[in-house]
Amino acid sequence: MALSPRLEIRQGQSLVITPQLQQAIKLLQLNNVELEAFVEAEMERNPLLQRDERDAEPEPEDSARIEATDFSADNVPDATAAQEYDGGASDAFADAAPGERATGDAGDEAAQQAGGQVDWSRAGSGGSFELDDDMEGRLSRAKTLSEHLHEQLSVTTLNESQRAIASVLIDAADEGGYMRADIFEIAERLGCTVRMVEDVLGVLHGFEPTGVLARDVRECLSLQLKERNRFDPAMAALLDNLELLARRDMPGLRRVCGVDDEDLREMISELKGLTPRPGAAFGGEPSHAVVPDVYVREGLGGLWLVELNTDTLPRVLVDQRYHARVSGGTRTDQEKTFVSDCMASANWLVKSLDQRAKTILKVASEIVRQQDGFLAFGVEHLRPLNLKTVADAIGMHESTVSRVTSNKYLATPRGVFEMKFFFTSSIQSSSGGEAHSAEAVRHRIRQLIEAEASEATVHSDDRIVEILKEAGVDIARRTVAKYREAMRIPSSVERRRVLREAV
C-alpha cells in the first residue's frame, strides 16, 4: 500500500473543559473565606464587576406585608435561598439570617411597634465618641510565647552572638513551648559550635514558664522537677520509663524505680501536678470561627427547612451602565476585545456564583433528607450514606457532590457539622435489616465503655462484639478494636487496671 498525503473530514463529539467551566468547578470546592478572596481578586481585575450594596434584610414595617404575601414556589423568582421538604416550598426570608427572621412571636412584636418605628430602648447611651475605660482592654490581645521569651531575653547578660543564637532558638519553639529544631542544624546554619548552642539553650531553660524550649516531654518535666528540687534518681528512672506509666504497669515501675507502692503513688501525683505543655498558656495565632454555609432548622409538622447563609455569599453585579459608556468609547480592536472579554467574564462569574449556590442547597437538602433521623433523634440514628447515593438522587456526578461537601458546614439544632460528617460507611445488620452507620456503631461502643463502673463490668472486644450482635449489628472483633483505638480508648486490660487503682 503506497503512502500518500490526503485530506479527510471527520465528524465527532468530544468533551472539552473550557476555562469558564474550570472556573465553575473551582468555585464549587472553595469555602466561604476562599470564595470571598477569589471574588475580591476578580473585582480588582474586572472593572465591570461591582458589589451589590443593597440591604437584603426587609424593613420592620414590611415584615407583616411579606408574611401575608403568597410565597409559593411559582411566585418566588429564585428558589435557591431556602427549601422545604414537603415539596420544595421556598422560604420568604431568604436573605435574612435565621435569628433575624420576622416569624412567630418575634415577627408579631416587630410588626406591632407603633408607626413601624424602630425600638431604640436597647441602644447604648451614646452622646460621645471618647474611648471608654474598657476600650483598651478590648483592643488588647494575649501576649504570645515568643514575645514573652524575647522580653526575658532582652534583660539577660548574653553577648550579641549569644543573643542571635537565642533568638533563633526562641523562633523554633512551637505552640506547646517545645524546641523542635535540630541543634546541629542550627549550629551549622549560624556558623558556630554545637557547644555554644547548647550553652545558650541551657540559659533559655531558666526562662519562664519553667520547662519551655525543652526538646521532649522528659526534659520538660525534669526541668520543672529540678526547679522544685524533686529530681532524684528514682524520679529520673520514672521519666525514663514513661511508656510504662502510660500502660499503667505499676509492677514494672516499682522495679525500675526501686520504690514501694506508696512512694510510687507520690511520684505519680507529683508528675500530675506538672505542665507537659508550658507554652499553651500563652496566646497564639487567632483561631477563626467556623461560619456555616447552610442553616437547617425545624419547621412545622416535623419538616426540616434548609436555607443558605446569605452572609457568606458574595453579592456581585455587572455594571451595565458603565459597560455601555465604555463600549461606546472604544476605538481599536484591542479595546473592543478587552471590553467584550470583561463583559463575558463578569456574566459568567455571576452565573457561576448563582449555580454554586443552587448546587450547595440541592446537595445540603438531600443530605438532610437522608439524615433526618440524626437531626431528630441523635447520632445513633445516623444512616449509612455515600456520595453515589446523593449524586443519583439529585442527578449530579459524584465528583460534583465531593467538591460541594468539601469544607462546607451545616448549622443544625445539634451543632455545626461539616458536610463530610454525614457520609459514613455501612455495617451490615445481623438480622438482615437496614444497615447501620459506622459513626453510630462507634458511638454505641463509646457508650458501652463509658458505662463501665467497676473492674467486673469492663467489656472486652469480644464481649462488645456479642452485645452489638444482640442489637443487630454484624461486626468483627478487629473492627471493634480499630474503632476503639481510633477513639483513643485503651484496651480492656488497661481499663481494668485503672479501675482497680481507683478503688
Image (tube, rainbow, N blue to C red):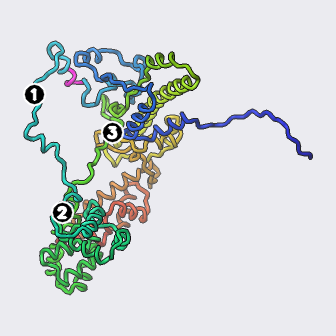
Q: Which residue lies at the image location 44% right of the left edge and 16% below the top edge?
A: 321
**Quarter where residue 256 is shown:** bottom left
Residue ranking furthest to the front:
160
Tell me: residue 225, above or below residue 52: below
Q: Position of residue 481 (x, y in %)?
A: 39, 65
Is label 3 in contact with label 1 (beta carbons under 8 Å)? no
**Label number found at residue 292:** 3
How far apart marks 1 and 2 lie (CA) works out to: 44 Å
Circle 2 is placed at which residue position? 154
Q: Which mark is residue 202?
A: none
Q: Amino acid at mark 3?
A: Pro
Quadrant location of the C terminus in the rendered image: bottom left
The numbered mark at residue 126 is 1
**Magenta stretch mostly in which secondary structure?**
helix
Residue found at the far top of this picture:
115
Secondary structure state at the residue bearing disc 3: loop
Q: Nearer the viewer, residue 414 or 452?
A: 414
Marks 3 and 2, the one that precedes in the sequence: 2
Label 3 – label 1 distance at C-alpha = 33 Å
Whether residue 87 can be seen here? no
Q: Residues within 10 Å of mark 2 (few under 14, many from 20)?
A: few
Q: Amino acid at mark 1?
A: Gly
Alpha carbon separation for disc pair 3 and 2: 44 Å
Give the residue furthest to the right.
1
Q: Which residues are magenta?
A: 103-108
86 and 93: which is toward the camera: 93
Question: In the rendered structure, which amino acid carries the disc numbered 2?
Answer: Ser
**Whole-percent x and y of residue 472?**
40, 54
Label 1 secondary element: loop
Closer to the camera: disc 1 or disc 2? Answer: 2
Label 1 vs 2, first from the N-terminus: 1
